[in-house]
Amino acid sequence: MKNMVELRGGAFRMGSDRFYPEERPVREVAVGAFWIDRHPVTVAEFRRFVKATGHVTWAEQAPQAADYPGADPDDLVPGSLVFNETDGPVDLRDVRNWWSWTPAADWRHPEGPGSNVGGREHHPVTHVAYSDAEAYAEWAGKSLPTEAEWEYAARGGLDGATYTWGDEFAPNGRPMANTWQGEFPWQNLGSDGYERTSPVERFPPNGFGLHDMAGNVWEWTTDAFGAAPALRACCAPPSPQAERYPRMVIKGGSHLCAPNYCLRYRPAARQGETTDTTTCHIGFRCVIRAER
Ligand SMILES: [Cu+2]
């Protein structure tokens, strides 16, 4: 299977007791055999899907007034959530300090009007809602992963390691994933080489030969997140209508995850995101389950 890796499956220890409450408890989980994309779906790959199908993404459609009661009709235009670095330290409890609803932001215009994906064809596609990821997977003859499949793949055969590559964040000083260096959300040092997304496969693969299982972009999975505990994450921007759409588990953390705020570039890390949410730091990859 082109650009996919075959995994045997089996039992593994999922979750972590050492970080955030939503990752607990550590428990043994088993997954069957499956193939998984070597890297997140790229802009170039997504473009082939759009050309072949005429798919119009969620972010490119105006929200329905019925879905967002009380919304200002002027706000019901196509758009998406874009991260904006702040000028200085801000109240980390209010994610609106750095997330802006941006009209006309979409997968082709990741920072909104005036931006484009020229030169970023091999970056992960972003601004994709859950339904966009599902539609792509169906077109490709694939599926979206369950959370357990995703985490099993991300761990790369390591048992209970903090990161997808081991227990040390930067072995020999080498950055192993596209994360945020500096104080979130105002000081983006970019010392790993990237302030926003990075081309896939730019950082070393994990033990299964998979790239970007940590950092770069969060990835959709098919598990419902369930009742949301109180979260303070850079990575869970509030949906205007969180009740109408289910909250699914996203995995892997992103280029916005910073130790001072959201240490989630780890295989056990998870967030809940409503299926209608699109942002500049959520993408996806696909799997194919082995025939039983
Ligand atoms: Cu984060």
Image (cartoon, rainbow, N blue to C red):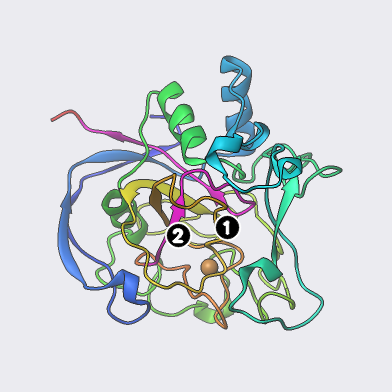
Q: Which residue is mark 1?
A: 216
Give the camera-side residue of 258 and 94.
Answer: 94
Work out whether 175 lies above or below 38. below
Mark nearer the N terminus (1 vs 2): 1
Q: Which one is in front, 288 or 186?
A: 186
Q: Residue furthest front?
A: 70
Q: CA distance from mark 1 to mark 2?
A: 8 Å
Foreground of the two, 239 or 68: 68
How crowded pointer 1 is (Cα within 10 Å; few <14, some 14-19, many 20+) is rated as many
Q: Which residues are magenta?
A: 269-290
Q: Quadrant of the C terminus?
A: top left
- Residue at 71% x, 64% y: name it: 195
Classify mark 2: helix, strand or loop: loop
The percent coordinates of residue 269 (x first, y second) are: 39, 67
Residue 16 position within the rendered picture, expressed as x and y whole percent measured from the top left: 29, 74
Q: Given contact means CB atoms under 8 Å apart, are the residues at marks 1 and 2 in contact?
A: yes
Identified by mark 2, the residue type is: Gly
Q: Residue at left 57%, top 60%? A: 237
265 left or right, relative to 104: left
Identify the element where label 1 is drawn: loop
Up-down: is 170 above or below 254?
below
Above/below status of 47 relative to 150: above
Asked if residue 211 shows in the view, the reply is no
- Identify the residue at horizontal 83%, vertical 42% (top origin): 113
Q: Amino acid at mark 1?
A: Asn
Quadrant of the image containing the N terminus:
top left
Residue 4 locus on image (x, y percent) = 40, 37
How many marks are shown on the rendered structure? Answer: 2
For this rendering, which residue is in front, 87 or 168? 87
Q: Which residue is mark 2?
A: 252
